């Protein structure tokens, strides 16, 4: 069988497992919904320093946050499978090792995009106004970012021993990246030194691009830079994740 067929088999198995876990689906979506419902109204009377409404600023940020946090922690599931011997049994079959990575990554992309759609729908209820094309492009950014971080997360999970070790690494990396990317509040509100540091964080360019397309601005330098940075990050993460995965 081809790599594509093997990937489809692993994707189907992982997706069925995800759909059977109603608790995982519920709580995986709860945090971004709470950000939207409890944090969003606090921003409606504030000058965000950017064009558009506060919802056009917050919703894209929460979408990227969902991809960042959701993609970064998926390796915990693989780590548990590895420790239980499930992964070793699967690797003893004719299934391509790369398919084991790609199938899981594709499942994560589908799950995170589905959650992103629900997030946008809730945003519309609260007052978000964005063109359909802009929303679709924003979801594409989320899908690419989710694929990149999921693959890297799985590669990391293959090279640490315990879930606490994995969680410590993921938490240490994710928190400053989230804060410096301006996901919840744009970095235009930050002091000069902090705004300068944030320019070294690739997720800042992703969220800036998504905010632009939610405003209906598709052909701008911000969108082009965001697309280029996100694509380059995805290539690096996918290649790095695949090497880490196969090395173990």
Image (spheres, rainbow, N blue to C red):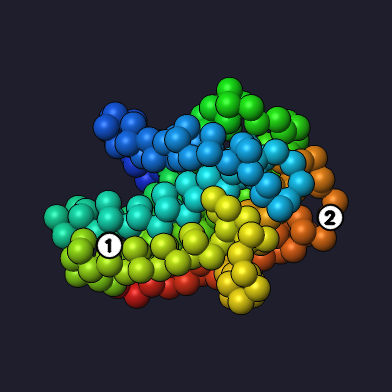
58 relative position to 219: left or right:
left
Q: Is residue 8 visible?
A: no
Choose top left, top right, bottom left or bottom right for residue 21.
top left
Residue 116 rendering spot, x and y as whole percentages: 53, 37
Mark 1: few/some/many CA within 10 Å (<14, 14-19, 20+): some
Residue 90 rendering spot, x and y as whole percentages: 26, 54
Residue holding disc 2: 220
Relative depth, front residue between 207 and 114: 207
Choose top left, top right, bottom left or bottom right for residue 133.
top right
Q: Secondary structure at mark 1?
A: helix
Residue holding disc 1: 167
Whether residue 46 is situated above or below residue 229 in the rendered picture: above
Q: Residue at x 40, y 68 (%)?
A: 173
Which of pointers 2 and 1 lies earlier in the amino acid sequence? 1
Whether residue 213 is situated above or below residue 171 in the rendered picture: above
Q: Residue at x 19, y 69 (%)?
A: 161
Relative depth, front residue between 68 and 159: 68
Q: Residue at x 77, y 59 (%)?
A: 222
Choose top left, top right, bottom left or bottom right for residue 26.
top left
Point out the residue furthest to the left here: 84
Relative depth, front residue between 38 and 18: 38
Q: Secondary structure at mark 2?
A: loop
Q: Residue at x 54, y 27 (%)?
A: 122
Whether residue 59 is situated above or below residue 161 in the rendered picture: above
Residue 49, disc: none
Q: Is residue 217 visible?
A: yes
Residue 34 rendering spot, x and y as whole percentages: 42, 36
Marks 2 and 1: CB-CB under 8 Å?
no
188 relative position to 244: left or right:
right
């Amino acid at each position: 069988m081809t790599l594509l067929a093997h990937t489809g088999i692993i994707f189907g198995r992982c997706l069925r497992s995800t759909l059977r876990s109603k608790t995982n689906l519920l709580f995986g979506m709860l945090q971004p919904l709470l950000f939207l419902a409890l944090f969003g109204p606090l921003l409606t009377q504030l000058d965000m320093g950017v064009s558009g409404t506060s919802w056009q600023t917050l919703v894209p940020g929460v979408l990227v946050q969902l991809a960042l946090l959701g993609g970064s922690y998926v390796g915990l599931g693989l780590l548990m499978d590895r420790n239980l011997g499930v992964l070793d049994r699967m690797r003893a079959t004719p299934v391509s090792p790369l398919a084991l990575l790609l199938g899981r990554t594709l499942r994560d992309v589908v799950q995170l995009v589905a959650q992103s759609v629900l997030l946008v729908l809730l945003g519309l209820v609260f007052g978000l106004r964005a063109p359909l094309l802009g929303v679709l492009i924003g979801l594409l950014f989320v899908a690419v970012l989710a694929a990149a971080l999921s693959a890297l997360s799985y590669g990391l999970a293959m090279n640490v021993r315990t879930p606490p070790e994995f969680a410590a690494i993921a938490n240490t990396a994710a928190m400053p990246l989230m804060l410096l990317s301006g996901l919840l509040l744009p970095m235009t509100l930050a002091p000069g030194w902090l705004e300068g540091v944030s320019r070294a964080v690739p997720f800042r360019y992703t969220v800036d691009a998504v905010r632009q397309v939610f405003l209906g601005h598709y052909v701008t330098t911000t969108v082009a830079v965001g697309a280029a940075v996100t694509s380059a990050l995805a290539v690096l993460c996918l290649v790095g994740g695949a090497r880490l995965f196969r090395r173990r």
